[in-house]
Each structure stands twice: as structure tokens, then as C-alpha cells.
Amino acid sequence: MPLQIETDEHKALRAAVAALGAKYGRDYITRTVAEGRHPTELWNEAGKLGYLGVNLPEEYGGGGGGIAELSIVLEELGTAGSPLLMLVVSPAICGTVIARFGTEEQKRAWLPGLSDGTRLMAFGITEPDAGSNSHRITTTARRDPDTGDWLLTGRKVFISGVDMADAVLIVGRTEDARTGSLKPCLFIVPTDAEGFRKRPIDMELSAAEKQFELTLDDVRLPADALVGDEDAGLLQLFAGLNPERIMTAAFAIGMGRYALAKAIEYARERTVWKAPIGAHQAIAHPLAQAHIDLELARLMMQKAAHLYDAGDDIGAGEAANMAKYAAGEACVKAVDQAVHTLGGNGLTREFGLASLITAARVARIAPVSREMILNYVSHQTLGLPKSY
Ligand SMILES: Cc1cc2nc3c(=O)[nH]c(=O)nc-3n(C[C@H](O)[C@H](O)[C@H](O)COP(=O)(O)OP(=O)(O)OC[C@H]3O[C@@H](n4cnc5c(N)ncnc54)[C@H](O)[C@@H]3O)c2cc1C
């Protein structure tokens, strides 16, 4: 049998999701953004077709696949111009963490809805004063000694899709009863809980998903709002962060492929001298480089997904970071070159590429910045000393 990077099932999934993406496309997203709506029709249809929960366990309504399958869904929707950012958060981070570490009740309460898209969960780790240094987060949970409830207080920033979400998986800290030190813990916080407030951040981003600043003011949560084990919070957190990185890579590769395809189409037709501009190597070579960079990033994303789905969290950690880095850089360059290829038209609303310049930068910053990945590889992989 010939060696295949992707199975026939994966190829079939790609083709099927690409067909759904083509039905909606960039115009649909542009319209929903202009109307200030969410991409509900696409989300619901993808949910009905089983694409939103491909990675979640079958016994809870999911497709029984892994992050390899979910990343294909996001990449292909993005390639069609209609990415769903909340796939990175709801099924990939929150679904994974609950499926792997949640109690039986949490799994039954959340996974079927996250799988078919009828329920949605956002994810909140970033804080205004901690930023990339998540060891500095101060959102703190303490127990009410009388009821056993949790009381959660803190602030979060840049949390995506809170207005679409039923709950937010919040990363907080609790005090270790023995040592008094603070340890990370994950809580499911309903968006209608008392003391939970959200404020939209005015982003210079043309996207259907908005970012929010959150204030949690003694939000009272039942004891079972804690996900999994109080003493294994860090392990659970990392289990969710690898899928987040792999999915951000998929988001970036999809956007890069979309922009590149637009540029190639234009470069084949547009003629200002004797031959189409795509015949000039100054236009053709950077597009060829962008294609190569996107293909290389995809290969690393597939490696990371493969390791993660095989249960190798440590191996997946390095590969997921590298994939996110490579995909973010490839996306930024592909979008930049696509805009340039269209000349003045690259900056018109009609051709719709200029807004991707800002959107592409998200993949360089979030969920972990380019520099923090270079730090990780410098220290963890290369064994170089730390400066911070
Ligand atoms: C569109 C969007 C959506 C997001 N969605 C979510 C979400 O749903 N949930 C969530 O929790 N967060 C979300 N985030 C937040 C995102 O994860 C953070 O923006 C990111 O982790 C960087 O943190 P920061 O913005 O505070 O930057 P900072 O940490 O302040 O960093 C600023 C700059 O300094 C650099 N820097 C910092 N430390 C070092 C160092 N040691 N060495 C070298 N350089 C360094 C960084 O690389 C960066 O370039 C989102 C962000 C965006 C833009």
C-alpha cells in the first residue's frame, strides 16, 4: 500500500467539510460581521453534520476521533474563508479537558451539547496583569466553609466568544491546604452566574467572534463546578493547551490557504504587460514560498495531532508549539504576499484581503506568542539558560 500522510477517512472528511465551507464562504462571514451577528447558521449546520464534536467520545455524542480530525474541520472551513474560531475553544480545549478529566456528571451535562454545538463553552486563562506569564494569574477560588461552595474572584481579558457561550472554563487558583501555596484549578462558570460580568473589548478585528474582559466578583459556584481533581489542575490544563495550539495552527493554515488561493487566481488573470503578473518571478516565487511554508506547517500540525491523539502529551507539547509557531508565521507571510499580489485591489473592501492582515496577526500572538514559543524551544529543546 502506498504511504499516506492522511487516511482515506481524513481525506473524505476534508472533502466533506470543504463542501460545507464552500456553501458559506467568505461572503457569509463578511455579512455576519457587518450585521453584528454570530455565524449561527454555519455553526448549527456543522453541528448537525457531526463536525463540531468529531474529537469527542462517541458515548457522549461525539465522533470518537481526535484533534487530527477536528483540525481538519477548522483548516477546511478556514480555507473556504469561513473559519469558526470557537472550534479552538469549545470542543478542542473545554471538550477535551472535560472528556479526559471531568466527572461523569460533567461529561453527561456538557459533552453532548458541545458535540452537536447546541452548547458552547469559552475558555479564560489570560489576565491583564499576568499576560504571557500565566504563573502570575491571581483569579482565586476559596471554599465557603459552611456550604462547600466555591467563591471565585478575579479578572480575565481577551476571552473569545463569551456572548455565544453558556459557560466559561476559568483557570483559577486554590490554596493548598497543606502547604498554603497556590495551585491552578479549572472551574466551569455559567455566563449567567451572579457576580460574573463581561465587557466587550473594542478590537480592530473583522471577525464574528468578539473578545471580552471578565470580572468575577465572589462568583458562587457549587462544589462540582471544579473540573476533575483539585491536585491535578496543572496536568489538566496542559492537556487542554496542546489541542488549543494545534487548532490555532489549523486556523492559521486555513486562513493562509484562503489568502494564497485568492492571490493565485488574481495573478493568473491580471495582465499589465505582455504576460499575467503571475509570470513575473517577483510575484510567483513569494507565492511558491508561502505555499511551501504552509505545507511545512501543516506537516508539523499533523505530527502534533498524531502524537496528542496517541496519548503522548509531552511529545505533543513540543510539536504543538512548533506547529503553532510555523503556522502563525506562514499565515502572516501568506496574507501579506496575497495583499501585495493584488496591488491596490489588495486594499479594497471588494477583494476582502486587507482585513486578514490584522486577523493573521492573531495567530502570531495567541494563545501563546511567537517569542514564548522561541523561549520554550530555547530552554526545553535546546537546553539554553533562561533570561526571565
Ligand atoms: C483575538 C484574540 C483572542 C484571544 N482569545 C483568548 C481566549 O479565548 N482565552 C484566553 O484566555 N486568552 C485569549 N487571548 C489572549 C492571548 O492568549 C494573549 O494575548 C497572549 O497570551 C499574549 O498575552 P498578552 O497579550 O498579555 O501579551 P504580553 O504577555 O504582554 O506580551 C507582549 C509582548 O511581549 C513579548 N514577551 C512577553 N514575555 C516575553 C519574554 N519572556 N521573552 C520575550 N518576549 C516576551 C510577547 O511575545 C509579546 O510580543 C486572545 C487574544 C487575542 C488577540
Image: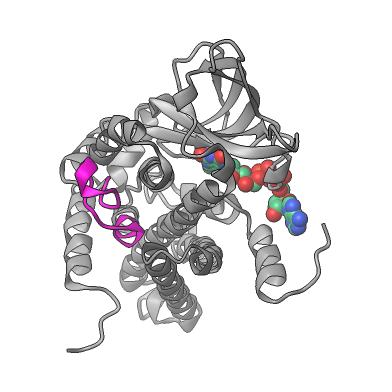
Residue in the picture at 58% in, 24% down: 214
Q: Is residue 143 above or below residue 352?
A: above
Looking at the rendering, the stretch of residues picked out in magenta corresponds to 53-72
Residue in the picture at 51% in, 11% down: 194
Left or right, 356 with respect to 108, comes to right
Residue 1: x and y, percent?
Answer: 17, 89
Q: Determine if residue 134 is in view.
A: yes
Q: Is residue 79 above or below residue 99?
A: below
Judging depth in this view, the residue of 32 and 323 nearest the camera is 323
Residue 100: x and y, percent?
Answer: 39, 48
Left or right, 9 with respect to 229, comes to left
Report the residue that reaches farthest toward the right: 387
Residue 163: x and y, percent?
Answer: 43, 25
Q: Is residue 298 above or below residue 173?
A: below
Magenta-span inclusion, residue 64: yes
Judging depth in this view, the residue of 210 and 141 nearest the camera is 141
Q: Determine if residue 97 is in view.
A: no
Indicate the colouring scheme: one colour
Judging depth in this view, the residue of 64 and 387 nearest the camera is 64
Residue 6, quarter of the rendered image = bottom left
Report the residue that reaches farthest toward the front: 178
Magenta-span inclusion, residue 227: no
